Image (cartoon, rainbow, N blue to C red):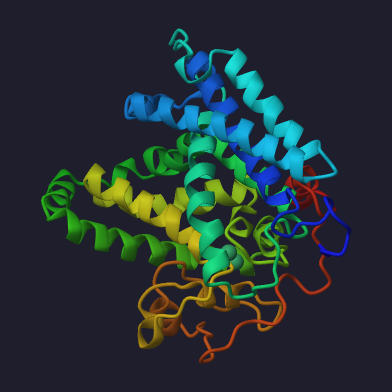
Amino acid sequence: MSTGLGRGAGRRFGSGWISGVLAVTCGALGYGGVLCLLFPSWLTTPSARALYPLELVRFLIYVMLVLGFGLGALSVVLRRRKVLGFTGIALATAGTLLGGSSAEIGTLGGTTAVGLDWFLLNLFILALLFVPLERVIPRLPEQAIFRPGWTTDLMHFAMSHLLVQVTVVLTMLPAGVLFRWATQPWLQDAVAAQPLALQFLEIVLVADFTQYWVHRAFHRVPWLWRLHAIHHSSETMDWLAGSRLHLLDIVVTRGLSFVPLYVLGFAPPAVYAYLVFVSFLAVFIHANVRFDLGPLDWLLATPRFHHWHHAANPVDKNFAVHLPWIDRLFGTAYLPAGRWPEVYGISGSPVPQGYWRQLAWPFLR
Ligand SMILES: [Zn+2]
Ligand SMILES: [Zn+2]
């Protein structure tokens, strides 16, 4: 956005835009946090509930509400257009009226409707990590945070996190239902008895090896490509762009990648460590971040490696998402020294914009 819009309407430092955006973000996080306290049965994930350090959660909600007020007020003072500032203040006020950080925890029981806690927590941590990182070492310094398509990607991010309960169950389903016959107690005992660090490395290897072939199938088989094309429709790469994935793409890719992990019987702590690792790496490799490992580029996937997977030209390169040398092994690697793609997306841009249209598009003729 141009900064020549006159006082109080641009996005430059001092225009009240940054404080306004932060006010809305913090106000929304605080308000959502209070809702999670009040309606834990409806809005929080049972498996995560027991793990939350409640004092810290309440403190963070308090900080978010205070920032929503304070930055909202600052933005209202600085900015001619007051909508951001007042929205931040309104969200913080609503959260406070509902009890704020000391809201009593609602009754538990029944099944979860949505994982609002999971969505807010991930948004908080990832935005805190990647928004500054993309400012400090940007690949494209001129690229805006709120670039075209960001609302679509935020919707993808929100839906996949809000529906975490559903996607986790569906991810584990193919393994448990179709491959129970393949499990061997002696094998699973031997695998789980190894040191956890070794199991972690083995999981990274086994998961990406499976993912590589599933991913190639998604590019090769026409009806699978219609699902996966949604992911490739992003024409701007940043930390949020990787969230643009059709729900069926998520479930099928993760479900199949999980099968060998299930059959081999890795110990749960090693699997959880892998899940944390992969959730960060998946965001990182899409980020608008200039990060080179130099000669170690082939060891671990970097933004530059995965950005070439999203290049408009050449296509069908770099299918691995953890270990680039798998692509070298199978002849699909493309990583010209020091170079980045010029254009991202699918030539001809066949995929429509907007979350719901993208969800429906693979099924339309
Ligand atoms: Zn792909
Ligand atoms: Zn990607």
Q: Is residue 211 left or right of residue 134?
A: left
Residue drawn at point x = 53 percent, y = 18 percent: 100
Q: Is residue 70 above or below residue 277?
A: above
Q: Position of residue 216 (x, y in %)?
A: 55, 69
Residue drawn at point x = 37 percent, y = 56 percent: 277
Q: Position of residue 307 (x, y in %)?
A: 58, 74
Picture quadrant where residue 195 is located:
bottom left
Ligand 1's quadrant = bottom right
Q: Position of residue 26 (x, y in %)?
A: 59, 37
- Relative to the observer, which residue lies in front, 13 or 358? 13
Q: Position of residue 230 (x, y in %)?
A: 70, 57
Hey, which residue is sitting farthest front in the picture? 77
Q: Is residue 284 left or right of residue 10?
A: left
- Relative to the observer, which residue lies in front, 171 or 357? 357
Can residue 287 be seen at all in this image of the molecule?
A: no
Q: Is residue 160 above or below residue 141?
A: above
- Relative to the observer, which residue lies in front, 239 or 127? 127
